Amino acid sequence: MTRAFRLLIVVVVAALFLAAAAQVAVMPSGEGTLRFAVIGDNGTGQEPQYSVARQMLRAHAIVPYEFVVMVGDNLYGSQLPRDFAAKFETPYGPLLRMGIPFYAALGNHDKPDNRDYPDFHMNGQRYYSFVKGPARFFVFDTNYLDARQLEWIETALKQSRDDWKIAVFHHPLYSDGDRHGPNVSLRVVLEPLFVQHGVDVVFSGHEHIYERLKPQRGIHYFIVGSSGQLRKGGMTPSPATAAGFDQDQAFLLAAIDRDEMTFQAISRTGIAVDTGVIRRRARP
Amino acid sequence: MSHTQIDLQFSDALGRAHHLEVLTIDGRGWHLHAALAGRSFDKHCGSWQGVERTLNWLRRHAHETTTVPTRAITHQVVRAAGVAAILFAATTGYAQSLPLTDPPTLTFMAATREYAVAHRRLEQQLAPLQITDRPEAIRHAIDAMAAAIRAERPDAKQGDLFTPALARELRVRIDQALRAHGLTAADVLAEGAEGPDPAMFTLRVNGPFPWVLSQAMFPCVTGALPPLPPELQYRMVGSDLFLIDVHASLIVDMLPYAIADLTVRHER
């Protein structure tokens, strides 16, 4: 094998590697940019979840996100100590060891006492909020939306003066998933509060697909429910669908830079299945 | 007689837009009408779930020239017809909850407050559940709390809090709340359909509550029930209503057949 031929092989391999890595495009990275990942319905402990986790690790090398938001169903089935290891600590171990925190919402498969597990950063609460840079994340428990939680939600949204208001909860208000669809009984209660108090983005799961909906009353809705579970072909697009992916598992990367959020949905195999930029709502 | 008409757009399998009229009269079901390829499509649906099934069927088959069947199948979920009906119902029905002043309800609320006081006392004696990095410690704390409550209430039985008089009241409240939002018993059952069969579990007062059976509570139902202290929550399993000690994962009481117009019963 000639030296030139060996050099050609090296160049081709390097080009292929870069081409694969380039599926995760460079996102805004200026000073003050807030980068995070979103996963949902992930806690299966099965290979697809691990595969997505490895993809998340690869993506972190390109887009060094600072934390991960979990939209619920963080653990499926048995939730003994060994399950926390198999369904959370092991697949996301590399990220955890890098000090990347995970902020969890409770899904219908999660035991309520999982709010006491420190790596979910729930501080023992079913619902809570946290601030990262210009954004405040409001995490709700839509398994049990009682008057007490609603009062907290309204107060927290009203008091927030953050540039971005992002809601995180399990059951989607808008959805074109075939299995569950939109949770209208939640929508009639939550949407008026979101509209009144300027929520910009909502992340949910429950439906085992990825979907981005067209803005509904000015609010951008994402379903990130296929980061472990998957209902293949489980979506019927509607006029409200902006983008959808139901053929493989996926997760979301997001970067907030001043008034814009850039996002990418990445499949289990590292393909960008949805990308875009959204602007936050104007504040009065 | 009150009625409302809702005009919907949907796309068929070929991407062509169609128009569907949904008319509801006095809350007695919905009448659907559409013009499809020169044919008139008309169907009456007694339930909101029927509307959503029909709309999903139309999405898949409206482009065909064959006669449309009168009944749709599948587990398809709510679309705009049901959504609009619910939104309409919600604006008129949500504020019509019964006041919580009847004696059985007041007795129940007092009993839950009493339970919460006992719970907190026991929790202090045991040391409250702490945030911990060991899942086994969480499990141990839950088990210890449950054991303490069982020791405190060794003779607890079904109906201690959900008394017969209250049971009648709760069934009415739940039924009214569902109807006011255009929901049916089938919708509640569908919410929990993806979980395991409850018949596989032994559900009894003072026993553990298997969260794998838990389904999200409809806010309209939660809102119609008496408020609870933070230690307690309601949960539906099938058509049964459970009162759960959340910190102890313990069944405090249970009300079978809480949904009045049920079609499926679980025998235990």
Image (cartoon, rainbow, N blue to C red):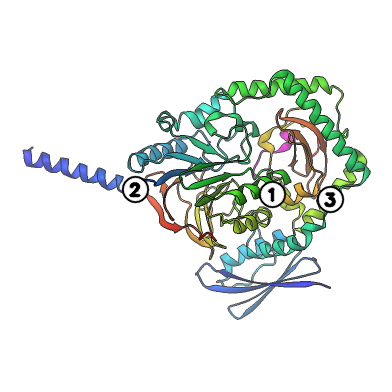
Residue B192 is one of the magenta-drawn residues: yes
- The quarter holding residue B97 reads bottom right
Pointer 2 chain = A
Instruction: Say if mark 3 contacts mark 2, CB within 8 Å.
Output: no
Name which residue type carries label 2.
Gly
Question: Could you tell me residue A253's position as x and y percent?
Answer: 42, 47
- The quarter holding residue B195 reads top right
| Left or right of B195 on screen, residue A161 | left
Q: Distance between the residues labelled 1 and 3?
A: 20 Å
Name which residue type carries label 3.
Arg
Q: Nearer the viewer, mark 3 or mark 2?
A: 2
Q: Look at the image and give the residue range highlighted in magenta.
A: B189-200
- Sequence-first disc among 1 and 3: 3
Decide if residue A261 is in sight here.
Answer: no
User: Which residue carries the number 2 mark?
Assistant: A30
Q: Name the mark on residue A93.
A: none
Number of residue marks:
3
Label 3 residue SS: helix
User: Which residue carries the number 3 mark?
Assistant: B173
* Other residues around mark 3 within 10 Å, as few (<14) / some (14–19) / many (≥20): many
Name which residue type carries label 1.
Ala
Q: Distance between the residues labelled 1 and 2?
A: 47 Å
Q: Distance between the residues labelled 3 and 2?
A: 55 Å
User: Which residue carries the number 1 mark?
Assistant: B190
Residue B75 is one of the magenta-drawn residues: no
Pointer 1 chain = B
Of B170 and B237, the residue lying toward us: B170
